[in-house]
Image: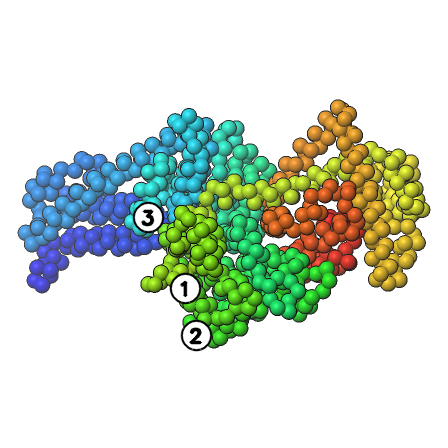
């Protein structure tokens, strides 16, 4: 205690030294706790430099204060502090050999000085190594200038999984020359020690590693031939939005693609509002993509394993969803339209511990859940029975009591949160299912859980084929071994202590979902794009042919008794569009609102529903007949080299904008959903006799039948997106005039569905 008091009495400068030490400690501690990763935050190396420098300046102040003026003392101390970092400080001569220390604090002062003299050069060395490390990364990136660059906003399990998949898929040319280069940015953060394993894997795969933020590095010049793909995958939504906006501003060039992985509404609004001229921008809703991908690959099993229940005309698909979080909502919405096929009855039961779960979902999808559509059959409309059990915890007896009542269950989807929760719930539900007697074939429902960890999936998961294989064995073991003599009793996935199988399916693991064929080169996305572009090209073909065949149109109108109706309609159309008499006009534009009905047919259609339907059928038949004439004439036009060349120019001008408009959120999701259902029908050979028949050979009734399948699915899809009926379409308000039964569609809209 006496020694401590002497510091203040015998050499007051010692107070400054202690203050400097405390100041140094506080600065390092507070700044190290700041959220590194924000736009203007300091890296840890900068924090240490500033803190050490301040401490060194205060350290030398007492020395020079005895010899120089205050101003000279201050600047000389700064100069000496800099010398510490430049390996120019002589500790023995300047500190140990200094005789001006008061005896009471000599040991303390020398010890403190030894720390500064040793620590400052280490910081300098770190800066030098960091500089060369960044320089090597830049040189490596520039050296492989011919490769396609895949640039990730940060290093995490998801980005590493996708990068490894890209690396595996993109083989080197002649086994030597790389085609693609992987780049990770922002690889150092406050949890660096936790990501050491990820860092080692990234280095092993030969990735370019940048410490800097993705915005701080320039990856492509305007006229560079290098293709660049950006991937923004992180948990920080505000950071993703900032990165996306910055990249869209800086890299709006051809050959650049930006994929933003987010289900946040802020990101959706940014993607829609901030348009680019050349760059392709895609927002990937991770959870929705996972559900869609799973249904596309495995959803056919829901139909193949539907139950035949006594008293039911159709096969029953009875799905149970446990957990109405983000995964549960997407699955519920997707199943509502995916399960719409004639010959099948869809039932969905949902359990969630939130007491307001049902009300919240009703607010999200009002018309999907209202009394008019849910559990209420109407011809030409989707049919489903959705029941949401709110406030039910899986760990209480009430859950099992309610589950016992669903004796027709065919499929159970578990999505409660973490891997541990989902796996625990799935095994618990499997035990409950064993105690329930199921109707129809008595088969236990299939259970599928969301599991992120690929290792867990590899050890404990079963596939649909393995489930069917095991069921085959259980039904007839002797016949099974006769059929498969090479096999022993099949054991798949997780089992209990008596080797009884839990038979749990799993989706969502990083290795399988964050992969090249799911995210980048997906067959499903290609199919959605084909549907979107196909419609636009078809429309252009019709317009191209129509605008060159006025004579044939006149003959068609005359032969169908439409001359008077057409003349009256055309006169009104010309007046509304200010086209003078004798002035040429575009036939395709002119007839876009024509009803293809005679005046008498239009008058009759107003009498009753049957007359209206009859008139619409007649009009639809005429539209189809005219379109067939268009296609035949288009093929004739293509034999003319000059016209064929003209069409190629139009086609090139239309396809690229169509491809770009496909990336708009609404078009992207709806086209992919349509593709999923179309592919399902092909797998099931649903109405295959119609699908395999050329369009021109189908009867009107068959074409309407095909249109009805698509319209029913579309109605359910739109309601799952939150849309409801209104006389006029307004996408901002989420209302649409076509959310009606098939019989109430206009001729043109029925034709589109068909």
Which label's residue is closer to the chain start, 1 or 3?
3
Please tell me whether mark 1 or mark 3 is closer to you in this view: 1
Q: Secondary structure at mark 1?
A: helix
Which residue sits at x=30%, y=46%?
196
Marks 1/3 in contact by CB < 8 Å: the verdict is: no
Residue 401: % across, % down: 49, 75
Which residue sits at x=18%, y=35%?
88
* Few, some or many residues within 10 Å of mark 1 (<14, 14–19, 20+): some
Numbered circle sitting on residue 427: 1
Which residue sits at x=42%, y=34%?
181
Residue 394: % across, % down: 45, 70
Q: Report which residue position mark 3 lands on.
A: 195
Residues 702 and 737: in front is: 702
Q: Is residue 188 visible to the viewer in this orientation of the structure?
A: no
Which label's residue is closer to the chain start, 2 or 1?
2
Q: Report which residue position mark 2 lands on.
A: 396
Q: CA distance from mark 2 to mark 1?
A: 15 Å
């Amino acid at each position: 205690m006496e020694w401590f008091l002497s510091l203040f009495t015998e050499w007051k400068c010692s107070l400054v030294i202690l203050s400097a030490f405390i100041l140094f400690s506080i600065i390092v501690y507070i700044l190290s706790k700041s959220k590194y990763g924000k736009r203007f935050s300091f890296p840890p190396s900068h924090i240490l430099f500033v803190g050490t420098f301040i401490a060194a300046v205060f350290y030398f102040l007492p020395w020079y204060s005895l010899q120089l003026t205050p101003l000279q003392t201050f600047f000389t101390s700064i100069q000496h502090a800099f010398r510490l970092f430049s390996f120019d400080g002589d500790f023995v001569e300047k500190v140990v050999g200094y005789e001006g220390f008061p005896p009471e604090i000599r040991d303390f002062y020398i010890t403190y000085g030894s720390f500064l003299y040793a620590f400052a050069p280490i910081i300098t060395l770190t800066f030098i190594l960091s500089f060369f490390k960044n320089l090597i990364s830049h040189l490596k990136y520039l050296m492989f200038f011919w490769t396609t660059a895949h640039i990730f906003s940060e290093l995490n399990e998801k980005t590493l999984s996708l990068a490894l998949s890209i690396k595996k898929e993109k083989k080197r040319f002649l086994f030597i020359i790389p085609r693609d280069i992987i780049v990770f940015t922002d690889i150092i953060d406050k949890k660096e020690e936790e990501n050491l394993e990820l860092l080692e894997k990234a280095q092993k795969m030969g990735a370019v590693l940048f410490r800097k933020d993705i915005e701080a590095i320039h990856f492509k010049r305007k006229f560079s031939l290098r293709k660049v793909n950006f991937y923004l995958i992180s948990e920080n939504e505000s950071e993703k939005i900032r990165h996306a906006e910055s990249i869209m501003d800086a890299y709006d060039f051809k050959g650049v693609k930006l994929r933003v992985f987010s289900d946040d509404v802020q990101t959706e609004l940014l993607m829609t509002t901030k348009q680019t001229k050349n760059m392709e921008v895609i927002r990937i809703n991770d959870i929705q993509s996972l559900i869609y991908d799973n249904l596309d690959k495995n959803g056919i099993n829901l139909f193949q394993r539907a139950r035949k229940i006594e008293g039911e005309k159709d096969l029953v698909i009875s799905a149970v969803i446990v957990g109405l979080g983000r995964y549960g909502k997407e699955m519920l919405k997707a199943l509502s339209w995916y399960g719409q096929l004639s010959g099948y009855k869809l039932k969905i039961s949902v359990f969630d511990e939130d007491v307001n779960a049902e009300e919240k979902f009703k607010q999200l999808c009002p018309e999907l859940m209202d009394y008019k559509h849910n559990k209420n059959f109407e011809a030409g409309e989707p049919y489903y029975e959705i029941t949401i059990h709110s406030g039910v915890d899986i760990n209480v007896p009430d859950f099992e009591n309610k589950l016992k009542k669903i004796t027709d269950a065919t499929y159970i989807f578990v999505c409660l949160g973490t891997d541990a929760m989902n796996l625990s719930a799935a095994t618990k539900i499997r035990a409950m299912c064993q105690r329930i007697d199921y109707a129809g074939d008595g088969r236990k429902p299939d259970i599928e859980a969301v599991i992120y960890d690929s290792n867990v999936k590899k050890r404990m998961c079963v596939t649909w084929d393995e489930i069917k294989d095991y069921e085959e064995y259980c039904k007839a073991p002797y016949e099974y071994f006769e059929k498969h003599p090479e096999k022993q009793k099949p054991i798949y996935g997780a089992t209990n202590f008596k080797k009884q199988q839990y038979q749990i399916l799993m989706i969502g693991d990083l290795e399988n979902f964050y992969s090249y064929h799911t995210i980048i080169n997906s067959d499903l996305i290609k199919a959605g794009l084909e549907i979107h572009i196909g419609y636009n090209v078809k429309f252009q073909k019709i317009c191209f042919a129509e605008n060159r065949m006025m004579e044939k149109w006149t003959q068609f109108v005359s032969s169908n008794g439409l001359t008077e109706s057409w003349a009256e309609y055309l006169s009104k159309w010309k007046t509304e569009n200010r086209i003078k008499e004798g002035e040429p006009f575009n036939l395709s534009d002119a007839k876009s609102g024509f009803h293809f009905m005679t005046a008498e047919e239009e008058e009759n259609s107003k009498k009753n529903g049957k007359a209206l339907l009859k008139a619409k059928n007649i009009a639809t038949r005429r539209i189809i007949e005219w379109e067939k004439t268009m296609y035949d004439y288009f093929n004739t036009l293509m034999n003319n080299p000059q016209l064929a060349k003209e069409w190629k120019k139009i086609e090139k001008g239309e396809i690229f904008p169509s491809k770009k408009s496909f990336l708009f959120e609404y078009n992207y999701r709806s086209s992919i959903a349509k593709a999923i259902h179309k592919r399902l029908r092909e797998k099931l050979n649903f109405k295959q006799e119609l699908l395999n028949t050329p369009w021109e050979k189908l009867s009107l009734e068959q074409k309407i039948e095909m249109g009805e399948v698509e319209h029913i699915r579309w109605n359910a899809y739109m309601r799952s997106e939150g849309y409801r009926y209104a006389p006029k379409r307004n996408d901002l308000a989420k209302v649409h005039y076509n959310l009606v039964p098939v019989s109430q569609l206009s001729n043109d809209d029925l034709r589109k569905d068909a």
